[in-house]
Image (cartoon, rainbow, N blue to C red):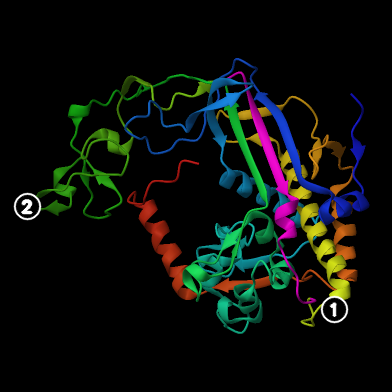
Amino acid sequence: MSSPKTLTLSDLSSAVAGEAVAIRVVRRLLPAGGAEDKVFPPTYVKEKQSATKYAMETRKVNGHDVQTVLLDSVASQANRIEEALLEGWRRQELSFPVISVDFRGAEGLGDLEQITSLQAPHRVADAILRDSVDANGTPFRQTSVGLACTDARPNHATAMFRYCPTALLFGVWDSTGPRGGLGAKFQRVLVSEIVGYDVVAGVKVGSRIDPLAIEKKAGPVFESKLDEGDWTSIAAEAAMENGSPKPFSRKGAGDKGSPATINHGNIPPSIDHESGGVTMAYAVHTVVISLAGLRRLRFQQFTNGGPIPAGERDAAETAARTVLAALGLAGVVYQNRNGYDLRSRSLLVAAAPLEFELLPNDGGEPTRFVVADVAQLLREASDLAAAAGLVWEQSVVTLTPTPKLVHLVAKSRALKAAGSGEDEGAE
């Protein structure tokens, strides 16, 4: 097999202009502990007919039915790629627009530092941005940037390109904006997923030996009348409820009033058949960047607000779409550098170096390629778009959280510290 070619900006621009329908990665992965090692997929709420808490399904592979399991979903992969892009941006290796909410001045929330449009779940349409203000105290939605992003559409994408181009890659639906369900909606053009093949579900065991040998019958333990978040085993020091000492409880920590609620006592050996990990023949990481999807994005205006003349529009739109494709490639390359440590006991390694494929429109053979310097490719592409009048915002759009948002976060943290917060998501 011949060596892959090194992608140039000209190659990418020609592909985006119409020579190719997509860029693809199909990459085999194996557990870091070896092919026979167990990995743990993300867990979900178990349906009645399901044997496990995993997203298992049967897929066709070479004409045969094969049991598979989802190891990392499209949404989770989008978040990981955005995180990789953010790391490259923070190291000043990659340059692209970012909107940021700065929590460093909020009392008790400084550890949050800055939450950016790459971290907010709904990107530029997220409530974190909505409930923040600019330096003049103007709510984000009412700022020039917020208004421009709210008005953006797939056929009028210049503002989103200027201020939050990652939303054009990973998709966004402004369903909570002033237009409700009719708000700006951009489909994903970069889709990534990791699936395990030829899977056998396993079991896991659990137990705990308490060196203090505290027995369950040593309880009950009570809520302290001095601090509702603390416990006591002395009835005279307990808070009262309906005339009796109030049993101590903590969500997800054993029976109310038992020593297990305060993490004391033995846990008998047990076997978990529903989330005991899997062994598999291999995993596959599949990435598709839809160039056809990028071609649906239209740019009617230059970033200075002026209309793009008809004779210049094709070139300008191709330049904008090319820089978005380069940004997507950068995300995949930087994610590869981060590796595939998906969660506890789910570390995967690639079986071969990262290669891409260009899929031609005519159904011909894909063209294999590598990217020598993706940061340089992104710089060249953004310079080309800027020369065509479509310029990325160079300065960070910085917001600060409103007092009501700060209060809500602080209250939520207090509830979690007291042990009464909601369960975390599985993925």
Examine the rendering and report whether any part of residue 276 can be seen.
yes
Residue drawn at the location 77% of the way across and 71% of the way down:
393
> Residue 13, image x and y in percent?
87, 55
Identify the element where label 2 is drawn.
loop
Q: Nearer the viewer, residue 417 or 299?
A: 299
Range covered by the magenta-colored residues = 280-302
Measured in 3D between alpha carbons, the distance from the residue under mark 1 to the one under mark 2, in whole angstroms, is: 80 Å
**Mark 1 or 2, nearer chain start:** 2
Residue 263 placement, left or right of 368:
left
- In the rendered image, which residue does mark 1 sit on? 309
Q: Amino acid at mark 1?
A: Pro
Above-or-below relation of 375 to 108: above
Classify 10 Å Cα crowding around label 1: few (below 14), some (14-19), many (20 and above).
few
Q: Nearer the viewer, residue 248 or 173?
A: 173
Identify the element where label 1 is drawn.
loop
> Residue 246, image x and y in percent?
16, 48
> Residue 5, image x and y in percent?
92, 37
